[in-house]
Amino acid sequence: MGYIGVSIAVALILGLGCFVQSLIGFGMAIVAAPLLLMIDPKLVPTTISMVGLTLASINAWQYRHQLSFRDLSWAYFGRVPGTAVAGGIMLVVTTQMLEIIIGAAVLLAVFASVMRFNIAPNRRNFFIAGFTSGVMGTTTSIGGPPMALVLQHAEVNKMRACLAGYFVVSCILSLIALSATDYLTWWHVKQAAFAVPAVLLATWLAYRIAPRVKPQFVRRAMLILCTLAGISTLARGLIGA
């Protein structure tokens, strides 16, 4: 497969991930990361973070009337040290070890949610979710599950809005950290730019379908995506260890 063929495949994969995230609120990286790793490991996490910033900006604008920065402020406070910790981890700790810990933690949180343990959307949990998401998003590109689990009982459009608003800041911080550790190059910029048309088409289709999607489906899909994220992250760590 030539350079153009690879770029088209990457754009289609990212477009599929953007469709899922625009419909549910998160999940682009969960869908795209495993497939992009098979094409070229260098695409993860930088290209996903760049496309994620574009997508989150579009979604935040689409659902701007449901945005609540009061709820998000503590997640932002947690995201900053989480990103800093992730930058240090990428320099001194093996990715495999981190993936094992993160994957297990996500699966434990999903189990707690399924068992009806209430993960309340309070300041403490937003801060913890922001911190954990900062570590996960910067190191593996999959940073949505912690925030999604805290917001799982919110009204669907509010959940989409808050996740999008969080991801805007989250992706910017991740890209700063990736740039500081030499994980961001012009090659990543070109791959992300090539995917923009697919991102726009995917979000347009998702917005047309979203009003017909029941809230129960969104929550179930969210838990399934979190489970897949935990399993795939844990599996990558165990296989690579």
Image (cartoon, rainbow, N blue to C red):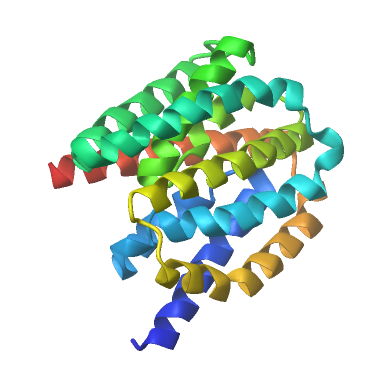
> In the displayed structure, does residue 3 sit left or right of residue 144?
left
Left or right, 181 with reference to 208: left
- Residue 73's spot in the image, x, y percent? 67, 23
Q: Is 7 placed above or below 112 here?
A: below
Given residues 211 and 80, the one toward you in this image is 80
User: Can I make out residue 170 in this image?
Assistant: yes
132 and 26: which one is in front? 132
Q: Residue furthest left?
A: 241
Q: Is residue 228 visible to us here?
A: no
| 209 relative to 96 in the view: left or right | right
Residue lying at 54% horizontally and 46% vertically, measured from the top left = 171
Q: Residue at x 35, y 42 (%)?
A: 139
28 and 189: which one is in front? 189
Tell me the quarter of the image containing the N terminus.
bottom left
x%, y% of residue 19? Answer: 63, 58
Q: Tally the marks.
A: 0
The C terminus - image quarter: top left
Residue positioned most to the front: 180
Q: Which residue sits at x=40%, y=59%?
A: 184
Q: Is residue 213 left or right of residue 192?
A: right
Residue at the image point whose x is 64% and y is 26% from the top: 151
* Location of residue 119 in the rendering, given as x and y in whole percent from the top left corner: 56, 14
